[in-house]
Image (cartoon, grey):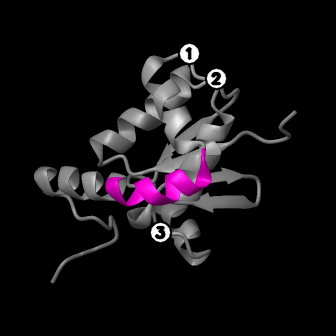
Amino acid sequence: MRAMALTLVYDGGCPFCRHFALRSELLGGIPDLVIRDGRSDHELRSMLRTRGYNISNGAVLMDGEQIWHGSEAIAMLCQNLTPSDPLLRILHGVFSDTRRANLLYPGLLAARQIALGLKGLPLDPDYRGA
């Protein structure tokens, strides 16, 4: 039994990230999963950055003081899923293996980069430009 709720911090500017996060919350079968939009939550983003985690380099999964980032976060989240949704079942099968998640995660980051570019958003929410 999990003592604390898992918290997924994602980039709310990315439509793929948002869709995955909302789907995981609603259909993932993880009791008390908390999802937080790291792009819109400056305080949370700042706290993560001071601990060495940047959401522009990947999602963050927290369980109390334990933090996973990027492919590790997605692998851990997928390992905890009990999906009732066909898409989440596929993602669970693909990304719950840590080695496979490490291999495929750069593709997810590339898709995020394209989506943010099309929306005119910077990859790093803290980037102010020149």
Residue 84 badge: 1
Element on which disc 2 rests = loop
Above or below, comparing residue 31 to residue 18 in the picture: above
Q: Splitting the image into 4 quarters, where does residue 130 fall?
A: bottom left
Q: Which residues are magenta?
A: 97-107
The residue depicted at 63 percent of the width and 59 percent of the height is: 68
Verify whether residue 9 appears in magenta: no
Question: Disc 3 vs disc 2: which is toward the camera?
Answer: 2
The amino acid type of the residue labelled 1 equals Ser
Verify whether residue 101 appears in magenta: yes
**C-alpha distance separating marks 1 and 2:** 7 Å
Provide residue 22's location: percent of width, then percent of height: 45, 30
The amino acid type of the residue labelled 3 equals Asn
Tell whether label 2 touches label 1 (CB within 8 Å).
yes
Kindly identify which residue carries mark 2: 29
Kindly identify which residue carries mark 3: 54
Main secondary structure along the magenta-highlighted residues: helix
Above or below, comparing residue 95 to residue 32 in the picture: below
**C-alpha distance separating marks 3 and 2:** 27 Å
Element on which disc 3 rests = loop
Residue 3 badge: none
Crowd rating for badge 3 (residues with CA inside 10 Å; few <14, some 14–19, many 20+): many
The residue depicted at 52 percent of the width and 22 percent of the height is: 26
Query: Of residues 109 and 42, which is closer to you in this image?
Result: 109
Query: Of residues 84 and 18, which is closer to you in this image?
Result: 84
The residue depicted at 20 percent of the width and 49 percent of the height is: 115
Provide residue 97's location: percent of width, then percent of height: 60, 47
Provide residue 64's location: percent of width, then percent of height: 76, 53
Provide residue 62's location: percent of width, then percent of height: 66, 53
Element on which disc 1 rests = loop
Instruction: Please tell me which of labels 3 and 2 falls first in the chain.
Output: 2
The amino acid type of the residue labelled 2 equals Gly
